[in-house]
Structure formats: C-alpha cells, structure tokens
Image: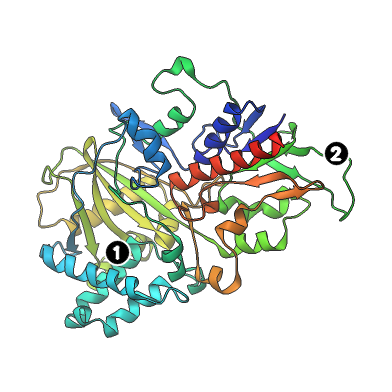
Amino acid sequence: MDVIVIGCGAAGIAALRKLHEAGLKVLGLEAGDRIGGRICTVPYGDRYLDLGAAWCHGEKDNVVFEIANPLNLLSRSESDKKYFVLSNGTLLPQETGEEFVKALNDELTAADKSAGSISGCVRNAAKTNQILKKDPALAQLFIEWFEHENHVGGQDDPKKGKSLKGLEEFHSCEGDFLLNWKGRGFRTILDVLLNKYPDASKELPVEIHLKKEVESIKWGTTKPGLDSGNPLVQIKCKDGSLFAAKSVIITVSLGVLKERHNQLFNPPLPIEKVNAINNLQLCVLDKIYIEFTKPWWPKQALSLNILWKKEDKAKFSVEEQWVTEVSGFLTVEHHPNLLLGWIYGEGAKKMEKISEEQVKATIIKMLEIFFNKFPMAPVKSILRTQWASNPLTRGSYSYRSVATEEKGGSSAILSEPLYHGNDFPVACFAGEATSYHHYSGVHGAVESGFREAERLISCFKK
C-alpha cells in the first residue's frame, strides 16, 4: 500500500481522490459507520438535514464553491437581515440592532491584533464606544449575544478564548456566506469528490473500510539515529486488524488529537506539535432543530436573535439554565416547518448530557416565554446534535486561542509532516485544524486534503 488515509471526513475523502487520480495505491480507514466526519447529512421528510456543516461559506478562494458551483448544486441565501428580540418577546427596531452590531464589529476591526482576546475587546468596548455608552444596559445584552453568536470561547478559562490574532490569520471568503445545497445537504460534496454525482456508475474505486478505529500508528524508531528496519508505517486498529503503508495521512479532529495523541503515536509526537495541539482550541457548537405543526412566522427567511434579560433567565431552574445560552433561531431552507436553534460552549455541553425529551420540554418552555407575543404553533419534535460527546470529534471546529499566542503553536505547525530517515514524509496531517487561513470550514478541510495528497504525490514521483 502506498498511502493510508485515517479519517474519511472532507479532508480524508479529498486526499483519497487526488491520490487515486495520481495512480497511487490508497486505502481509507474510518472509525465511524459512515464517511463525512463533521459533515453529517441525514434524511428528513422528503429531503435532508445537516447536523454538522450546512452552508458553503463564501465564493472567492473557496474550493468547495469552485467544485460545486459549475454543477449548479448551490443556491443563494434569501436574507442576511438579523432581527433582535428581547427574551420577554419584545422586538427591537431594525436600526437599533444594526447600530449595536456595527459598533461591536468596528471595535474588532480597529483593535490591535497582536495580543488579547475577542471577548476582552468587546467587553472593554462597553466603556469606551460612544454608541454602546448611550444605553449601557442594552449594550451588555448585545455584548453577551455577540459572544455567543461568534463562539468567542473562554467561558471556563480565558486562555481558551478566541484570540484577536485569529481574526487576522483567518481569511473569510468573499461572497454569499450562506450558500445552501438545495435540500440535498452538504454530503453532496463528498459524492462529487467520489464521482458518485451526477453519475453513481462512475464512482471512484477507492477502498474505504468503516468501523476501523485506529489504536496506534507506528511511524518510526524510538531510538534516535537508528533505522527501525521497517520503512513502512504500521497501523493497528481496535478490532485487531493491521495495516501498513509507505505513508499515512492523519485527518482526525483536533479534539481526538488532544484526547489521544499520547496513545496513538509511536514514537510520540515532537514537542512543538504537541504544543500546537494543546494550545489550539476546539469550539463546541450544537444545533437544535425544532419542528412545528405548521410555520407561524413570515414566509421570508428569518434570523431571530435573543437578547437574554436576567429576569427571564431566572425563570429557569438550575437544570434548565443551559437553554439561556441559546443565541437565536434561523429558518431552514427547504424545510418550511423548522426553526434551527444555536447553542455553544458550556451550555451546549450541558444540553448534550440530558435526554432528548428533557431538551424538548425545556425548549418548549423557553419558546413560550420568548414568543409569548406571537401566535406560535405547537412543537411536533426536536432533533439535537451532540458534537462534544462524540468520541470521534469532541467538538465542532478549531480556532486560535489566547494560549496559542502566548505559548506558541499554529495550524502551520500542526500540518507539518513527520519524517523518517531519508526525509520522506511518513505521516502527514490534514483536516480543517491544519488549514493555514480557512480553518473551521469544510473548504479548509478539503484544501488540506488536497495539500497533503499533492505533497505525497510529489515525493513519490521523486
């Protein structure tokens, strides 16, 4: 075997495609019972829902857009307007929301990106920004919403919060940020990469083994300066199966690397890579799809954002407090009876640990408070995600933290291969966390898979 790809999410599938096209003998090992990783599209009614990645974020310099758009797979978002509602059901004037959000974004734009956290920046803005100072009480509600909406982190440890430097390093793709898949779901990009779309009969003959959780990766000798006698990377799975290849591409999530890198790699990873793994962070972002018996909101696309007042938070018990970290709701393209609620961080982790029935009951209680001034239809069902609890992900997407800036580490360091003897890259790293400028997105993951495949193709040619 030339190359084994560990993890068959977007990065792994992209790498497998490019390696196969180059004529290399490749194999994919996937710990789960499906491909896709944090792309998780499930049937729902006569269409599909995305429990993970849902939209193609932008057009310029976006490899997913470049692949999908010529096939007419994407549809433009209907609206980008945000409506703000106090948690007692009072709708704020449109211009008020726009003014406060612009003030907070302007503060981030003007901030010194060399140090500090996003959270610290927006909280300090309450004392200095003239627009925010006009109504300090309302400004605090917007700041709390802004922190939730942008998943700034640092709830349990300020060092784990998103860094200002990350705003400079991350490159947002210009164009429509919410391009949807016309009801087919994000899994469509995997079908395209595997040649299953538009003609399934032309599917690439790439071998992928499901339910193959890797237990160890032996990539070199444990004695410096000595050749191990076996130039192959040796991989052992939890079911006892063994595989060997000239090189391996590891695409598992940052969360899995944090939890298991000590057990996975033999010999252990270099200290600079461990440092990057420890200091980069993984956001926990969950979805709660709420199905109503009928739509009761206006027909146009909506983004309803909640400004939580203390007196409304107090209406929930200690066990129910997680729901006060729901930041807002979106309408769902091609699913007229659904609203999508967002929750991140500690609130999301608490939500994941209770039963779906408990989630449903608490959500209904919240909706009855929040939408008390609206003729709300009954809730039929809910569907929630559990990305932190999933041992194959342990979170949703990576980001640069304050600790990254203070203690070192980066996506570039994480992406560096491990070399053996003759400077051949025996272990390569891909996945959104290794993308230099597009981490957190599927396009960053696909880019990284192509990047590492091209690295190996070049080395094999030599």
Q: Residue at x 29, y 46 (%)?
A: 178
Observer able to see residue 13: yes
Residue 201 image point, x, y percent: 46, 14
Residue 341 image point, x, y percent: 29, 51
Residue 249 image point, x, y percent: 64, 41
Q: Judge whether 438 appears above or below 203 on screen.
A: below
- The picture quadrant where one finds residue 370 is bottom left
Horizontally, residue 12 falls left or right of residue 110, namely right
Q: Secondary structure at mark 2?
A: loop
Residue hosting label 1 = 316
For the N terminus, the image quarter is top right
Residue hosting label 2 = 230
Q: Judge whether 128 appears above or below 447 on screen.
A: below
Disc 2 marks which amino acid? Asn
Residue 55 image point, x, y percent: 34, 43
Q: Judge whether 74 appears above or below 115 on screen.
A: above
In the picture as drawn, the residue positioned furthest to the bottom comes out as 127
Q: Residue at x 64, y 64 (%)?
A: 275
Disc 1 marks which amino acid? Phe
